[in-house]
C-alpha cells in the first residue's frame, strides 16, 4: 500500500510507522529521520538543514523533495508510508504529480488526531538513542536498563520553545493539507490518543477498511 501518516509533531507518526514496518512490512519513509541522519553525518544537506531543524522551522521544499523522490524510488514505488512528507501545499502538489506520473497513486492518508496538551507532554518527555535513533518516552516507553544512559539524549528540536514553534508552523503551513486530501477522498482520521498499542489497533482497522 502507498500511504501517508499525517499529523502534528508528537502525534506518534514515527512510532506507528515503525510498528507498521515491523509488523506489516510497509517501509517507513521519514524525511525527518533522513535529515537527522544527514546532520549526524555532517553532509552538505545536513549542514544546510541544521539551522532550520534546530529552530523548528521547515527545511526548504527543494531540499526535501529530492529526498522524498529518492526514497520512494528506492522502495520501487510500492508499499511505503511517508512520515513527515508532505508538509506544504507545494510538496503535496509535487507528490500528487510525481505519483501520477508513475501510475502509483496513494491509497490513503492516515490523519492522527491528538490534543495539544498531550502533544507537548509526549515531545517534552521524548528521548532518543544517539546511535540507533530508537525513540523512547520517559513515562510510556522508557529506555531498557541495558542501554547505556549516556547515549540517551533529547532531540535538539524538543526544547520547550522549539516545540511551541513547531506546533505553530504545523498549524500555519501543514494542517490545511488535511483538506487537500479530504477533497481527494483519501483522508482517514485516526484517534491518536491512548496507549501505543491501542492506537496501533485503530491504524490496523483503518488499513483493513482501505483494503476492502
Ligand atoms: P520530523 O522528525 O518529521 O518531526 P515531526 O513531524 O515534528 O514529528 P515528530 O517526530 O516530532 O513526532 P511524531 O509524530 O513522529 O511522534 P513520535 O512517534 O516520535 O521532522 C523534524 C524536522 O525536520 C521538522 O521540524 C523540519 O524542520 C524537518 N522536516 C522534516 N520533514 C520535512 C518536510 N517534509 N518539509 C520540510 N521540513 C521537514 O512520538 C513522540 C513521543 O511520544 C515519543 O517519545 C513516543 O515514544 C511517544 N508516544 C508516541 N505515541 C504514544 C502514545 N500513543 N502514547 C504515549 N506516548 C506515545
Image (cartoon, rainbow, N blue to C red):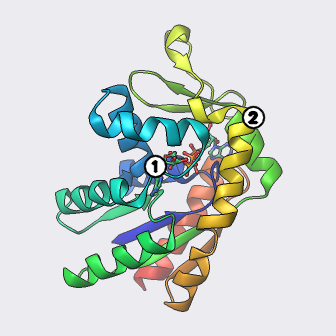
The location of residue 46, given as percent across then percent down, is 35, 36
Residue 114: x and y, percent?
73, 59
Residue 51 lies, with reference to residue 110, above or below; the image says: above
Q: Residues within 10 Å of mark 2 (few under 14, many from 20)?
A: few
Name the residue: 48% across, 56% down.
Answer: 84
Q: Which residue does the image show at 31% across and 59% down from the upper left?
A: 68
User: Of the numbered discs in the image, which one, if any, rests on residue 183?
Assistant: none
Q: Is residue 14 left or right of residue 72?
A: right
- The disc placed on residue 160 is 2
Q: How far apart, in angstroms, are the residues tagged by discs 1 and 2?
A: 27 Å
Say what secondary structure mark 2 lies in.
Answer: helix
Q: Residue at x 49, y 83 (%)?
A: 186
Where disc 1 sits, the SS reads helix
Q: What's the mark number on residue 19? A: 1
Seen from the viewer's position, the closer of residues 1 and 174 is 174
* Left or right position of 80 against 126: left
Eyeballing the image, is 167 above or below 53? below
The residue closer to the viewer here, 73 or 97, is 97
Q: Is residue 43 left or right of residue 135?
A: left
Image quadrant containing the C terminus? bottom left
Q: Badge 1, how many Cα within 10 Å: few under 14, some, many 20+?
A: some
Residue 191 visible in the snapshot: no
Amino acid at each position: 500500500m502507498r500511504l501517508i501518516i499525517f499529523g502534528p509533531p508528537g502525534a506518534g507518526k514515527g512510532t506507528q510507522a515503525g510498528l507498521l514496518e515491523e509488523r506489516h512490512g510497509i517501509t517507513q519513509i521519514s524525511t525527518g529521520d533522513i535529515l537527522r541522519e544527514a546532520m549526524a553525518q555532517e553532509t552538505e544537506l545536513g549542514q544546510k538543514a541544521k539551522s532550520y531543524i534546530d529552530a523548528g522551522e521547515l527545511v526548504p521544499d527543494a531540499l526535501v523533495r529530492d529526498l522524498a523522490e529518492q526514497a520512494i524510488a528506492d522502495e520501487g514505488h510500492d508499499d511505503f508510508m511517508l512520515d513527515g512528507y508532505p508538509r506544504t501545499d507545494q510538496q503535496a502538489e509535487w507528490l500528487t504529480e510525481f505519483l501520477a506520473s508513475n501510475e502509483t497513486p496513494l491509497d490513503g492518508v492516515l490523519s492522527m488526531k491528538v490534543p495539544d496538551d498531550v502533544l507537548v507532554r509526549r515531545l517534552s518527555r521524548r528521548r532518543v538513542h544517539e546511535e540507533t535513533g530508537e525513540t523512547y518516552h520517559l513515562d510510556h516507553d522508557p529506555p531498557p536498563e541495558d542501554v547505556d544512559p549516556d547515549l540517551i539524549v533529547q532531540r535538539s528540536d524538543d526544547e520547550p520553545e522549539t516545540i511551541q514553534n513547531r506546533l505553530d508552523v504545523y498549524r500555519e503551513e501543514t494542517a490545511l493539507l488535511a483538506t487537500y486530501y479530504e477533497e481527494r477522498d483519501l483522508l482517514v482520521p485516526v484517534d491518536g490518543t491512548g496507549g501505543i498499542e491501542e492506537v496501533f489497533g485503530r491504524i490496523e482497522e483503518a488499513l483493513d477498511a482501505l483494503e476492502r
